[in-house]
Image (cartoon, rainbow, N blue to C red):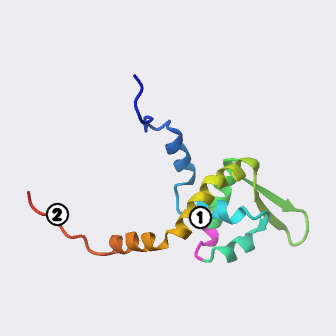
């Protein structure tokens, strides 16, 4: 007999994809790079609250996973560009769905964030 829902162990595909995109900046960068090749500086301007160090770190991780290609042009000063690989473009699809959902549900997100910021009332005693 099969269970109605898949197991959610570490090998579960849903958990595996969340390991790839589950941090704060990875989905944002995948979404930002979906428009095509971009320079580091362009990404910094597009995502103003990411530090240079964090942008570098996340781009390197995405490159290591084969999701982003780093292109270094041999010129002075050196010019470096980044773009999604085919695998990165495929992963962009579910990230874009989530971003579009978020854009259409800002009131719900505002409510959730407000609740998270407010002091929690203790549960009634049993």
The residue shown at (43%, 35%) is 7
- Range of residues picked out in magenta: 49-54
> Which residue is painted at 43% across and 38% down in the image?
8
Q: Nearer the viewer, residue 78 or 106?
A: 106
Q: Label 2 belongs to which residue?
A: 123
Q: Magenta stretch containing residue 50, yes or no?
A: yes
Circle 1 residue: 100
Q: Nearer the viewer, mark 1 or mark 2?
A: 1
Q: Residues within 10 Å of mark 1 (few under 14, many from 20)?
A: few
Q: Is residue 7 above or below residue 113?
A: above
Give residue 63's position: percent from left, percent from top. 70, 52
- From mark 1 to mark 2, how far is it between C-alphas? 35 Å
| Residue for point 61% across, 64% down | 28
Residue 106 location in percent, x, y? 49, 72
Residue 112 is drawn in which quadrant? bottom left
Name, please, the residue furthest toward the right.
75
Other residues around mark 2 within 10 Å, as few (<14) / some (14–19) / many (≥20): few
For residue 44, above or below residue 6? below
Q: Please identify the quarter of the rendering in which residue 115 is found.
A: bottom left
Q: Secondary structure at mark 2?
A: loop
Taking depth in this image into account, of 84 and 96 the one nearest to the observer is 96
- On whether residue 3 falls in the magenta region, the answer is no
Is 6 positioned to the left or the right of 44 in the image? left
Q: Tell me where residue 100 appears, x and y as whole percent.
A: 59, 64
Closer to the chain start, of discs 1 and 2, is 1
Label tally = 2
Give left or right: position of 55 versus 79.
left
Element assignment for label 1? helix
Q: Residue at x 76, y 61 (%)?
A: 82
């Amino acid at each position: 007999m099969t269970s109605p829902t898949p197991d959610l162990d570490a090998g579960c595909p849903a958990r595996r994809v969340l390991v790839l995109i589950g941090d704060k900046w990875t989905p944002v960068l995948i979404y930002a790079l979906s428009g095509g090749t971009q320079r580091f500086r362009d990404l910094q301007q597009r995502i103003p609250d990411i530090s240079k160090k964090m942008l570098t770190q996340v781009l390197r991780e995405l490159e290591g996973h084969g999701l982003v290609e780093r292109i270094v042009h041999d010129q002075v000063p050196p010019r470096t560009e980044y773009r999604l690989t085919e695998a990165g473009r495929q992963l962009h699809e579910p990230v874009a769905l989530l971003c579009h959902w978020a854009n259409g549900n800002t009131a719900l997100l505002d409510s959730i964030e407000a609740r998270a910021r407010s002091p929690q009332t203790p549960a009634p005693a049993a």
